Amino acid sequence: MKETLEEALERLYPENIIKLGNNTSYNAALIKRKDFTDGVNWQAEKMYSEEDMIEFAFNTYHYISELMGVPFNLMSENKLHAMYNFERFKKK
């Protein structure tokens, strides 16, 4: 089971209030949670979608097919192979 962002934040950075005096307090976990969330969002921007990966696989097959002299009418089948292999090897 995958953990949601909110669950990870609560597990990793439970609320911890620090008393600063003069009836003021500081929640140190809030800054840590924001930094963690910023990191998660940055990483998500660097990831590729399934469609991006299928297109990459197809373009690679197409390019190699051209180099090998495969007739163009057979190249369209390579997209099906790309989609099949993506489904076969993607992480579950």
Image (cartoon, rainbow, N blue to C red):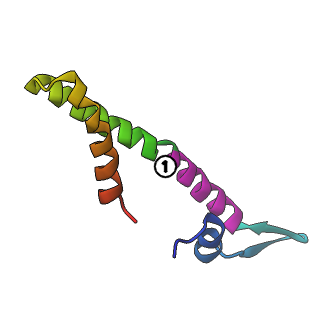
User: Quick check: 26 above or below 87?
Assistant: below
User: Quick check: 57 above or below 34?
Assistant: above
Q: Amino acid at mark 1?
A: Gln
Viewer-closest of 46 and 55: 55
> Looking at the rendering, which quadrant does residue 33 occupy?
bottom right
Horizontally, is 3 left or right of 89 in the view? right
Viewer-closest of 33 and 62: 62
Measuring from the top left, give residue 60's x and y in whole percent.
24, 33
Viewer-closest of 11 and 78: 78
The residue segment tinted magenta is 29-44
User: Quick check: 34 above or below 80?
Assistant: below
Viewer-closest of 7 and 70: 70
Mark 1 residue crowding within 10 angstroms, few (<14) / some (14–19) / many (20+): few
Horizontally, is 19 left or right of 22 in the view? left
Magenta stretch, main secondary structure class: helix
Task: Residue at 71%, 76% (x, y): give it.
Answer: 16
Task: Residue at 54%, 54% (x, y): give it.
Answer: 40
* Kind of element beneath mark 1: helix
Residue 51 in magenta stretch: no
Task: Residue at 30%, 35% (x, y): give it.
Answer: 58
Measuring from the top left, give residue 23's x and y in whole percent.
90, 71
Q: In this orientation, does residue 64 appear?
A: yes
Residue 38 in magenta stretch: yes
Q: Residue under circle 1?
A: 43
User: Quick check: 28 above or below 88?
Assistant: below
Measuring from the top left, give residue 66's x and y in whole percent.
16, 23
